[in-house]
Amino acid sequence: MKTIGIIFTFLIVSFLFFLNKKTENQIEKKIDIEKIVVVKKLNKEIFTKILKFSGFSEASRIVTIKSQVEGKVSSKFFQKGLFYKAGSQLVLIDPEDKIAKVKEMEALLNQRKKEYEVAEKLYKKGFRSEVKLSESRTNFENALALYEKSQVELNNTKILIPFDSSIEESYIELGDYVKKGDDIAKIVDLDPIFITLNTTEKEIQNLSLNQKAKVIISNKEYEGVINYISKTSDQLTRNFKIQVKIKNKENKIISGLSSEVQISLPNEEAYFIASSLVSLDNQGKIGIKAVRNNKVFFLDIEILSDVGNGFWVNSSQNVNFDDYNIITQGHEYVISGEKVKIKYND
């Protein structure tokens, strides 16, 4: 009987020992499978946000020059595609009849002037009424107006270019007969040249007149300033039209070229993170995973700028990133709320 008691006691002790070892093994196994992630601290840096737009170049002025008089084109001094300075003569309309008209009006003016002078003298001596004097004055003034008009007509036979520009189109040839209002040539002013682009209602809040801009055309950089901001949006796209002005003295930039416009905004503080650290949560929000007190958190972010190898970001919920360790390795294998061990980047 004593032997049986000893055996029973031995079995109980053995069972308890085995149970204790199993529990210890489970605890050790749980500890062993606890995930380890690599983390680092983020530091705020000075960041300059750059707004980027696609646009195209446009001539600052496109004007169609028209004839102011009727007549035959007796001389043509321009060639399509060439550049001309302001005041250069483009065309001469045969002035022969206009010269004759000036002489006729000059003779009439001299006659009316003498008549008025005689009437004035007679009026002063009391031999001419005030009505007759007024009539002579009116005749003289009318003759003067006709003479001046004939001079304008004669001057308009010389068609001049109004500003420095290039000839885009020619509408006449030597010997053509033109009427008043007929097209002579289309001219384009490329200095300055405008870069036209569209911006959203959010972006336009950061733009102002005379704000500096960098323009890239065919891999060449140019400096410009904003010279126009639309006050109304496009009815279909809801975007706003913006123009950037660039000096183009040598007319190297022509109209219609694709352009990239970069506008720097005032400096601000932000965090830089690698593109690989950005992920989505279950609600589709953009953010990064971080650890505090060995617990995983998903932190929403606002992307300020994409610079190719990473993003400049800030918290979209006013969370202080300084209170967290950002997961740089292993974030794909952990979820928010999970307990982890951390290891700092070397």
Image (cartoon, helix red, strand yellow):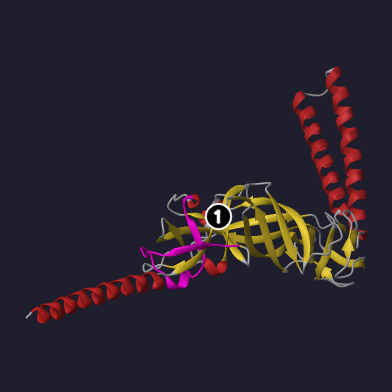
Q: Position of residue 156 (x, y in %)?
A: 85, 55
Which class describes the residues within 10 Å of circle 1: few (<14), some (14-19), or many (20+)?
some
> Which residue is the extreme one toward the top?
125
- Whether residue 126 appears in this view of the structure is yes
Name which residue lies at 36% across and 67% down: 283
> Which residue is the extreme one toward the left?
1
Q: Is residue 62 magenta?
A: no
Q: Is residue 331 magenta?
A: yes
Name which residue lies at 90% across and 39% down: 111
Residues shaded magenta: 323-346
Q: Position of residue 326 (x, y in %)?
A: 50, 60
| Left or right side of 113 for 335 | left
- Camera-side residue of 272 and 217: 272
Q: Position of residue 77 (x, y in %)?
A: 92, 65
Residue hosting label 1 = 42
Vertical comparison of 168 with 159: above or below = below
Q: How many marks?
A: 1
- Camera-side residue of 60 and 229: 229
| Left or right side of 157 for 268 | left
- Camera-side residue of 324 and 319: 324
Q: Position of residue 292 (x, y in %)?
A: 43, 56
